[in-house]
Amino acid sequence: MAQKDTMLHLFAGGCSGTVGAIVTCPLEVLKTRLQSSGLTLRPVLQVQLGTLNGTGVIRPGTVTPGVLQVLRSILQNEGPRSLFRGLGPNLVGVAPSRAVYFAAYSKSKEVLNGVFVPNSGKVHMCSAGTAAFVTNTLMNPIWMVKTRMQLEKKARGEKRMNALQCAHYVYKTEGIRGFYRGLTASYAGISETIICFVIYETLKKHVEKSQFTSPNSGKGKGASDFLGLMIAAAFSKGCASCIAYPHEVVRTRLREEGSKYKYFFQTLRMIAAEEGYAAFYRGLVPQLIRQIPNTAIVLATYELLIYLMRDSALKPV
């Protein structure tokens, strides 16, 4: 029964992750481009007033292009297909990564419920952290290839590397270690997963409590219940992304080809010194636009599949 339950979580997690990845791929590409150090900054003139002799000092500065400007640049110079760069490894990786994540989360929660107070905040935090650690360690090579493909800039008609060619190039130029660039930043990003799931599980309890106290509580879950779970997932991910977002920028910088960024804390210091603290939030808007609906779709699809498959398994043949 335990093995069957694990397979159930693997299947539901894989399906839900695939749906979310396809729908939100263009936003993933925009976010990655905005996070990159290769983003072309627009020069402007900044006027500093209030000098000793009463005159202004004009000095050059830069402004980060907005989401729409980056989108327009990609469409004009590279074509619409570039908005789906990295979808191949994303689809290859997202199903197993979501499957591994949800299976590890479910198994960890099952084990930790016997150690701590069942379904407490501590159980949810430890389960989410364990699942994220396992998933990041196993899936980092695939996400590394995806990021490299999304950062590759080719004009219309120029031949682009596919996932296998990109993986071969990374191995040829950087060896096995190249596939694990950005892993430390991914580990730092476990905090985002923990925050997200703690908030989500808390809100989920309220949704389920309202379900049991509603007049139709004996009829099982309805559309309004899954809508409630989607809203809970969206709110949870929005909060977690805003708090933990800087690790995403650091991870992208570490994965750039020929990057001057080598280690997590060194990258943090360099970005802060060279670009200011605002640079840690470049790409946050497309990230939120992508991640909030994506997480809502993934978690609601996952909960729906678990509910339907368990319900069908309990029905007499």
Image (cartoon, helix red, strand yellow):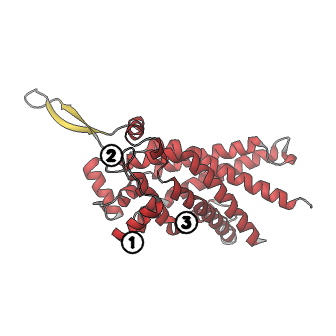
Secondary element at tag 1: helix
Where residue 197 appears, as percent x and y from the top left, is 60, 55
Q: Is residue 86 above or below residue 128?
A: above
Mark closer to the chain start, 2 or 3? 2
Q: Quadrant of the C terminus?
A: bottom right
Mark closer to the chain start, 2 or 1? 2
- For the residues carrying marks 2 and 3, which lies nearer the camera in this image? 2
Q: Residues within 10 Å of mark 2 (few under 14, many from 20)?
A: some
The part of the image, by quadrant, that contains residue 1 is bottom right
Q: Which residue is mark 2?
A: 39
Residue type for callout 1? Arg
The part of the image, by quadrant, that contains residue 23 is top right
Secondary element at tag 3: helix
Q: Which residue is mark 3?
A: 135
| Residue 177: numbered disc | 1
Where residue 110 appears, as percent x and y from the top left, is 69, 68
